[in-house]
Each structure stands twice: as structure tokens, then as C-alpha cells.
């Protein structure tokens, strides 16, 4: 586990390497498959999710971003909606495979240290690891996403048209 402490001055310190680290450095650790935990130096609170959110936002800074309206809506909706989005993202990104990877690494370590034998390793893997065939997630293609965007635009236009018609009818009814 790569442990990083965040200080009050917003600096991040990699305790394993005994040096400061940037958000890009954390991204590199994650991309290399390293498990990372970020702790607030003053409180000891686990702030990994908040820091990883910053890493993702910074990494995506030059690419496509979520529209401001979507982000504003998520913030207004509050914690329950954000938790639902988080669960959805984890399932889409195959969060189970990340857990499986961590379990596999720990089991391999137990085998290497002699704490368990090969038969016990096989038994534990069968019990603890997900079936990889059922974990395959089909992500939408760019064409699918473009088609969905077009449908949303069409629906938005239809709603605007209906609202304008309603306002026109309301104005006429009030004028009579």
C-alpha cells in the first residue's frame, strides 16, 4: 500500500518513498497498479477519494469535460445521487476487478511466504475471486454516445416547444 499524507499547506508526502509527490505522481502510481491511500496529516482521516477525484479532474483537464449543468445538477442533488453515480461508475469500470487484483496479490504473497500451500491458494481463489467471464462490461461506442446525444438534443427541443406552446395557450386564456 502506497501511503500519502496531505499536509495543511496542501502538499502531498509519499511516506513510503520519503519524498513529496504531485497529483501526476499519484496518477502514475495508480496506472502502475499500486494501491494508494491518502491520509490527512492532522486528523488521520482517509481522504483518498477526494484526492483521486482531483487526480481525475486534473488528468481530464485538457480533454472533454462534463457540462457545467450536469456538474451543478449533481451538486444540487446531494449525497444520495453522488453515491448512486459512484456505484454506477464502479460497476462500469469493473471495480470488482480492482478488488480481485488486491485479493490475488495478497493470496500470492501468502503463498510466497509459505503461509498457505498451492491447494489452499486454489481453494481461496475459487471462493474469493469473481468469475472473469461474467465481469466483462460492454462500454458504449462513440457512435452509441453520439446517437444518445442527438436523442437528448431532440427531446430537449421538443420540451422547449411544448413549454412555449403552453405559455402561448396560457397567455391566450388569460387574455380572453
Image: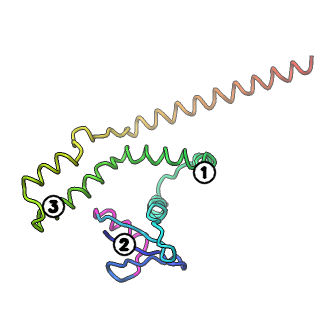
Residue 168 at x, y percent in the picture: 80, 23
Question: What's the CA distance linking mark 2 and mark 1?
Answer: 29 Å
Question: What's the CA distance linking mark 2 and mark 3?
Answer: 21 Å
Q: Which mark is residue 75?
A: 1
Residue positioned 38% across, 69% down in the render: 26
Is residue 23 positioned above or below 167 on the image? below
Query: Which residue is at the far top?
Result: 176
Residue positioned 31% across, 68% down in the render: 1
Classify mark 1: helix, strand or loop.
helix
Give the position of the C terminus as an image quadrant.
top right
Q: Is residue 153 left or right of residue 113?
A: right
Classify mark 2: helix, strand or loop.
strand
Q: Residues within 10 Å of mark 3 (few under 14, many from 20)?
A: some
Which residues make up the magenta segment?
Answer: 20-33
Residue 120 at x, y percent in the picture: 10, 54
Comes first in the chain, label 1 or label 3: 1
Residue positioned 48% across, 33% down in the render: 148
Q: Is residue 77 left or right of residue 176?
A: left
Question: What's the CA distance linking mark 1 and mark 3?
Answer: 42 Å
* Residue highlighted by disc 3: 108
Residue positioned 54% across, 44% down in the render: 81
Classify mark 3: helix, strand or loop.
helix
| Magenta-span inclusion, residue 149 | no
| Magenta-span inclusion, residue 23 | yes
Q: Which mark is residue 170?
A: none
- State which mark lies toward you, 2 or 1: 2
Comes first in the chain, label 2 or label 1: 2
Q: Are marks 2 and 3 in contact (CB under 8 Å)?
A: no
* Residue highlighted by disc 2: 3
Is residue 149 positioned above or below 63 on the image? above
Task: Name the dominant secondary structure of the magenta segment.
Answer: helix
Residue 40 at x, y percent in the picture: 48, 72
Amino acid at each position: 500500500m502506497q501511503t500519502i499524507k496531505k499536509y495543511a499547506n496542501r502538499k502531498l508526502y509519499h511516506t513510503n518513498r520519503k519524498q513529496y509527490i504531485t497529483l501526476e505522481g499519484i496518477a502514475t502510481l495508480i496506472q502502475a497498479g499500486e494501491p494508494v491511500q491518502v491520509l490527512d496529516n492532522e486528523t488521520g482521516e482517509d481522504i483518498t477519494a477526494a484526492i483521486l477525484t482531483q487526480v481525475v479532474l486534473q488528468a481530464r483537464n485538457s480533454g472533454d469535460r462534463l457540462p457545467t449543468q450536469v456538474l451543478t445538477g449533481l451538486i444540487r442533488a446531494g449525497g444520495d445521487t453522488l453515491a448512486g453515480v459512484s456505484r454506477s461508475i464502479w460497476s462500469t469500470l469493473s471495480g470488482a476487478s480492482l478488488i480481485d487484483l488486491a485479493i490475488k496479490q495478497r493470496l500470492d504473497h501468502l503463498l510466497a511466504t509459505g503461509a498457505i500451500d498451492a491447494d489452499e491458494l486454489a481453494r481461496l481463489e475459487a471462493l474469493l475471486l469473481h468469475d472473469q467471464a461474467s465481469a466483462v462490461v460492454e462500454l458504449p461506442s462513440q457512435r452509441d454516445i453520439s446517437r444518445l446525444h442527438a436523442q437528448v438534443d431532440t427531446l430537449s427541443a421538443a420540451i422547449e416547444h411544448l413549454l412555449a406552446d403552453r405559455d402561448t395557450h396560457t397567455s391566450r386564456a388569460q387574455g380572453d
